[in-house]
Image (cartoon, grey):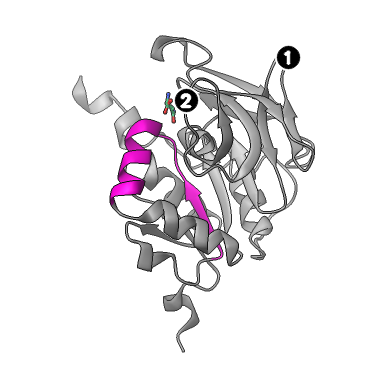
Amino acid sequence: MDHAAAGFGVIGVLDLQGGVQEHLDHLRRLGVAARPVKRAAELAGLAGLIIPGGESTCLSRLLAIFGLDRAIRQAYDGGLKLWGTCAGAILLARENVGEMPCLGLIDIVVSRNAFGSQLDSFQCEALAPAVAREPIPLTFIRAPKIVRAGEGVRVLLPMADYIAAAEDDRILVTVFHPELTPSLAFHRYFARKCGLSVAGGDDAGVDPDWTPHSWMDFSHHV
Ligand code: GLN
């Protein structure tokens, strides 16, 4: 059997809406085999699945339309590791303040759009010692806050009044977007959580050749 074609050792990125390509690019920079996932059948054999940022209402409707919500739960029961970034974290949360949960797979409570409007998006740097020895650049885009984490959940990045990154044994959640920064640290961390061997140390994994993806590069519009 062609194991790579069957998905073994491959991380998928849910490709319904949102920041798909940037995650694929980061995984490939690490030398991790990665592919977009649009259909339930494409989950077969994957080591992990990233649910990207985007718009959680839109994503949850598309998940239901394509039967991917049920398929992701089944694949998770079969051992698939999951990482939700921003909207993806909202979809994975067991509780969502004022709204119904979607996949409900990790014992956290999230509060959507908790920083305000799109204009309240921001960047900063923070140290997540379990993930990297050096501070990691973080990009928050109309992000949610993780406001509570249950007993089996480890907090990877505590902030003043919320949690920015957390995990349990099978799921990683980040309310920010590592794929929109030059740092590969969280992708390396997730790949290792998926049981894949990835080169590189415990540094922030900043790729000197990284440039913002074309949608962030306005130079050609001038
Ligand atoms: N505000 C979006 C939502 O609630 C999430 C934004 C993001 O993924 N960057 O779905």
Going by the numbered disc 1, the residue's amino acid type is Ala
Q: Is residue 16 visible?
A: no
Residue found at x 40% / y 15%: 118
Residue 20 % position (x, y): 38, 45
Q: Is residue 210 visible?
A: yes
Residue found at x 63% / y 44%: 172
Residue located beneath label 1 in the image? 160
Residue located beneath label 2 in the image? 99
Residue 180 % position (x, y): 47, 34
Relative to 140, does residue 114 appear above or below in the rendering?
Answer: above
- Label 1 environment density (alpha carbons within 10 Å; few <14, some 14–19, many ≥20): few
Q: Is residue 20 left or right of residue 197?
A: left
Q: Residue furthest bottom?
A: 1
Q: Secondary structure at mark 2?
A: loop
Residue 211 % position (x, y): 43, 36
The picture quadrant where one finds residue 111 is top right
Q: Are marks 2 and 1 in contact (CB under 8 Å)?
A: no
Relative to 209, does residue 100 appear above or below in the rendering?
Answer: above
Relative to 71, does residue 155 appear above or below in the rendering?
Answer: above
Q: Is residue 202 left or right of residue 189?
A: right
- Disc 2/disc 1 C-alpha distance (Å): 24 Å
Residue 61 % position (x, y): 32, 40
Q: Is mark 2 within 8 Å of ligand 1?
A: no
Residue 53 vs residue 90, the one in the foreground: 90
Going by the numbered disc 2, the residue's amino acid type is Glu
- Label 2 environment density (alpha carbons within 10 Å; few <14, some 14–19, many ≥20): few
Q: Quadrant of the C terminus?
A: top left
Residue 125 vs residue 90, the one in the foreground: 90
Segment tinted magenta in the rendering? 47-65
Q: Secondary structure at mark 1?
A: loop
Q: Residue furthest left?
A: 221
